[in-house]
Amino acid sequence: MDLFSNLALGFSTAGSPENLLFCLIGVLLGTLIGVLPGIGATATIAMLLPITFQLEPVSSLIMLAGIYYGAQYGGSTTAILINMPGESSSAVTAIDGYQMARKGRAGAALSIAALGSFFAGTVSTFLVAIFAIPLTGIALQFGAAEYFSLMIVGLVSSIALAHGSIVKALAMVALGLLLGLVGTDIYTGTPRFTLGIREYADGLNFVAVAVGVFGVAEILRNLEGEKTRTVLMAKVSGLLPTRDDFRKMFAPVIRGTVIGSALGILPGGGAILAAFASYTVEKRLSDTPEEFGHGAVAGVAGPESANNAGAQTSFIPLLTLGIPANPVMALMVGAMIIQGIVPGPNVAIEQPALFWGIIASMWIGNLMLVVLNLPLIGLWVKLLTIPYYVLFPIIMAFCSIGVYSVNSNVYDLYAVAFFGIAGYLLVKLRCEPAPLLLGFVLGPLLEENLRRAMILSRGDPTTFVTRPISAFLLLIAFAVLVVVFLPAVKAKREAVFQEED
Amino acid sequence: MKSLSLDTTNALCGAILIGLGGFFIYQCLNLELGTAFRMGPGYFPLLLAIILTLLGFVILIQAARVHGEPLGPVAWRGMLFILPAPIFFGLTVRGLGFVPSLFFTALIACFASHRMKPLTAIALSIALTVFSVAVFSYALGLPFERFGPWVRF
């Protein structure tokens, strides 16, 4: 069996003592930063990216993947304990998780989240392993037109997932794409939108934009009110869920895993959609829907599993096509390029140890989270009591170091300040930053493939609809857009996002 | 007809997007457009900038109909101290070197909160600097000059 020999290769790579150590460090650091309120996975990875530069490519990517799971787990912890989700995908967990915590069942809620995530992580890791190779085969047949259409699907689905106005989300995508084009035009070498600043000729630094829009803007938002957080310090006891809890969580976890795995593959941030979808499904199927919103076990178990499964399978488009499905994956692309690896279908063929090592380390990382973090929960809770005014100078200092160390370009630091204020302005104007960032990453790729496709077709735009795969992808994108604008769906979508607030 | 009142948030958002779109369109005019067959550097950006401007107008028009929540409080003090922190780091990290530059960066950021007391701020900045130098400079070996030419005697 090819699959098993591949997985064996992966586990022997990821299981080497130093890689295990880096995975462990990654998981711990990720949780540590992810638990701090107001910093999501994107900002965490952006901050910690520089510490992986000195490592071997495999170790550095394993560590980054560990940081990612850790940060996500940390996000769920804050969602449950202080009703403050680190990022949107754990926002659903906060609805019922926080209510469970208020009823004195914080420990059980945390365990349910961790166990559900672990189960989902195990299943979806296998899915990644099974589907990676056939999908790579398909990916090798992709031409410029197909890549272009696939990215359109990604951008359109990121719009569907954004909060609030769809028109604003569309505008954010357009703005992000434009910002992504800042720098030197690849075909002619003409500088574009650099305002004559030579340091921006290579384009705006992605880490700087991500830190500004997600990190600094978030700090500013938290400084607005400066209210003291009500931390549920009532001891987190009774970690083990009761037998009744296990019974209640079993089916939701399995359903969540299925939903999450399927939606996570979609480029455009499937993990968030998965969590929402799972919550809605559980509420619909439940015998006691009135419990939802007041601490239902299924409302924690389902979305957490879905969210984690989606996080795992969102590696599939990255590993097979080299297309990042969400901002976190975009950071991974950045890390791979810094390590000299060009993401895409060739990675699996040319560097099997790296490819399968990452897949194996996903499972190891999930295992470490369960084994290590549940006992350490007391420590994470302590972290929550650190007052915010002590935290943000630390965050700002680390962000500055992190951004500067990527390229040693001081202009990247000015970009952080600029995108910090821009990101804050967007938040104030109720625009979502996630579609902007995805557009920013995909901008250059989209333009390159568009231009290449047009040259190949001798200027005939019908090439996008006459090539079958491309036409199919565009049809999906169109369908998503139509569905989002349907009045019935629009109303429901607003209701779902309302619930979150 | 009801009196024409605009939702401030959306009106502002639309106006800003139109402005940005206009800026990008203006910039594109200096670039070679090319044809659909061989697109020049300006073709795709111009297309995007036009879309952005149009969406800005849509939002502006919507502002007359839909009304949302007001803007809410603005973190003026936060902006005043948080934003200069990375800029200061950028301006001084080569001249002053990593250690002093980081210390002052942290110190500036500290004052964004009115709860921070001066002594705590200094203590926190010192601790943070010591920790970062140990981790980033010594342990990870990032190529930062610890003390730059401005502070060498």
Image (cartoon, coloured by chain):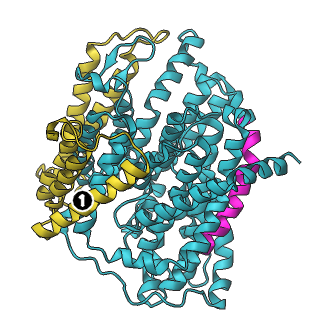
Chain colours: A cyan, B yellow
- Image quarter (top left, top right, bottom left or bottom right) of the C terminus of chain B: top left
Is residue A345 left or right of B71 when viewed as pictured?
A: right
At which x and y percent is residue A275? Answer: 53, 63
The residue lying toward the viewer, choosing from A253 and A39, is A39
Is residue A101 left or right of A471 when viewed as pictured?
A: left
Is residue A382 left or right of B121 when viewed as pictured?
A: right
At which x and y percent is residue A105? Answer: 49, 88
Amino acid type shown at disc 1? Pro
The residue range painted magenta reads A115-136
The residue lying toward the viewer, choosing from A320 and A426, is A320
Residue positioned 37% across, 86% down in the render: A233
At which x and y percent is residue A65? Answer: 56, 53
Residue that protrudes farthest toward the front in the picture: B153
Residue positioned 35% across, 75% down in the render: A384
Name the element at disc 1. Answer: helix
Residue A478 seen in the current view: no
B88 magenta-colored = no
Residue that numbered label 1 is attached to = A393
The residue lying toward the viewer, choosing from A260 and A349, is A349
Residue positioned 29% across, 40% down in the render: B145
Is residue A95 left or right of A316 when viewed as pictured?
A: left
Q: How dense is the environment of label 1, judged by Cα within 10 Å: few (below 14), some, or many (20 and up)? A: many
Q: Is residue A80 above or below residue B148?
A: below
Q: Looking at the image, how many numbered discs can be counted on the residues?
A: 1
Q: Is residue A348 above or below residue B67?
A: above
A125 magenta-colored = yes
Dividing the picture into quarters, in which one does residue A228 lie?
Answer: bottom left
Residue that protrudes farthest toward the right in the picture: A1
Overall secondary structure of the magenta stretch?
Answer: helix
At which x and y percent is residue A288? Answer: 57, 85
Write down the chain letter for disc 1. Answer: A
